[in-house]
């Protein structure tokens, strides 16, 4: 299918309008659902931008990789929250948002599972990562979002943070756009950071980032990460960040 470009905006305005209506409807339902917790001003700061750029996500392929799963719980929170569960929650919310914006969404997992078969855990983890990378390659996605939650010995650390591979200029731009949106709702403003050690980021050709959505080792943030309204706000912020990245002319897709 042909990829959507700004030049086609007028001709297909009906389609965009429909999408905008969906996005707006979603926005208002988010606001309503989160009214008791959400600082309304902050929420509207995020969502006001959506109708302006949502068209750009149409036709883009977005690969969403909910980190860990199955035998691998990932980080374990102070109050026993499992990273794999929170990652999946956010990933599913992202799936809804990108699908409604007309993107092709590929989910690496949609339930509690891993992709290894070995009985030895380390080997199984390797198989799992190899599967994720192979799937990413096969998908040939425009954007690869790897969703994780953080943990750190210093329990005071909190706030979401986005990582990119130092060799990827586009990865850096995408990470900075997502970080800027996350900082609007985050308890602590952080800077996007390069990181060589994320296996997935250096083994993919597409514009890839790893989003650490918060620290399960911080009691307050762990609690927030379990709240559905905060999960939705995080997802909206990530969604907005990707849209801002693409609309700033950093599209990885060439004209047809
Ligand atoms: Zn993780």
Image (tube, rainbow, N blue to C red):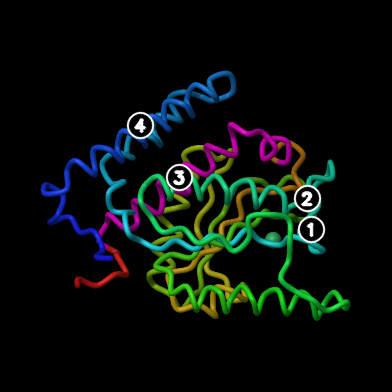
- The magenta stretch is 222-249
| Distance of label 2 from label 1 (alpha carbons) | 6 Å
Q: 155 or 214: which is nearer to us?
A: 214
Label 2: which secondary element: loop
| Residue 228 image label | none
**Would you say the residues marked 4 and 1 are in contact, meaning their CB atoms lie under 8 Å apart?**
no
| Residue 24 image label | 4
Q: Which residue lies at the image location 54% right of the left edge and 25% below the top edge?
A: 38
Image quarter for residue 52? Answer: top left
Q: Which residue lies at the image location 24% right of the left edge and 72% below the top edge?
A: 254
Instruction: Find out if the beta carbon at label 3 lies less than 8 Å from the nearest ligand 1 atom.
Output: no
Residue underneath mark 2: 82
Q: Please report whichever mark, 3 or 2, sits nearer to the chain's N-terminal start.
A: 2
Quadrant in which the N terminus appears: bottom left
Answer above or below: position of 147 versus 42. Answer: below
* Residue 42 x, y percent position in the rendering: 45, 30
Q: Is residue 41 left or right of residue 165?
A: left
* Residue 63 x, y percent position in the rendering: 49, 63
Q: 149 or 138: which is nearer to us?
A: 138
**Would you say the residues marked 2 and 4 are in contact, meaning their CB atoms lie under 8 Å apart?**
no
Q: Please report whichever mark, 2 or 1, sits nearer to the chain's N-terminal start.
A: 1
| Distance of label 2 from label 4 (alpha carbons) | 32 Å
Q: 183 or 96: which is nearer to us?
A: 96
Label 4: which secondary element: helix
**Would you say the residues marked 1 and 3 are in contact, meaning their CB atoms lie under 8 Å apart?**
no
Task: Specify few, some or many for label 3: CA neighbours under 10 Å numbering under 14, 14-19, or 20 or more.
Answer: many
Answer above or below: position of 240 versus 253. Answer: above
Does the stretch in magenta take in 233?
yes
């Amino acid at each position: 299918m042909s990829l959507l470009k700004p030049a086609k905006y007028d001709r297909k305005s009906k389609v965009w309008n429909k999408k905008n209506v969906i996005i707006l409807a979603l926005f208002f339902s988010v606001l309503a659902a989160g009214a008791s917790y959400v600082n309304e001003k902050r929420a509207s700061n995020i969502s006001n931008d959506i109708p302006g750029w949502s068209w750009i996500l149409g036709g883009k392929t977005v690969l969403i990789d909910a980190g860990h799963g199955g035998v691998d719980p990932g980080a374990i929170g102070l109050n026993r929250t499992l990273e794999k569960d929170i990652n999946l929650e956010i990933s599913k919310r992202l799936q809804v948002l990108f699908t409604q914006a007309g993107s092709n969404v590929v989910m690496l997992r949609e339930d509690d599972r891993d992709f290894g078969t070995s009985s030895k855990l380390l080997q199984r983890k390797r198989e799992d990562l190899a599967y994720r990378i192979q799937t990413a390659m096969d998908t040939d996605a425009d954007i690869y979002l790897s969703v994780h939650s953080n943990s750190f010995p210093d329990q005071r650390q909190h706030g979401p943070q986005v990582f990119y591979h130092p060799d990827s200029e586009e990865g850096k731009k995408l990470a900075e756009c997502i970080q800027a949106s996350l900082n609007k709702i985050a308890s602590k403003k952080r800077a996007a950071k390069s990181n060589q050690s994320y296996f997935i980021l250096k083994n993919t050709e597409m514009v890839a980032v790893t989003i650490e959505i918060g620290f399960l080792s911080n009691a307050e943030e762990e609690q927030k990460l379990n709240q559905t309204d905060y999960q939705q706000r995080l997802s909206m912020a990530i969604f907005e960040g990707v849209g801002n990245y693409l609309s700033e002319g950093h599209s990885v897709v060439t004209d047809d």
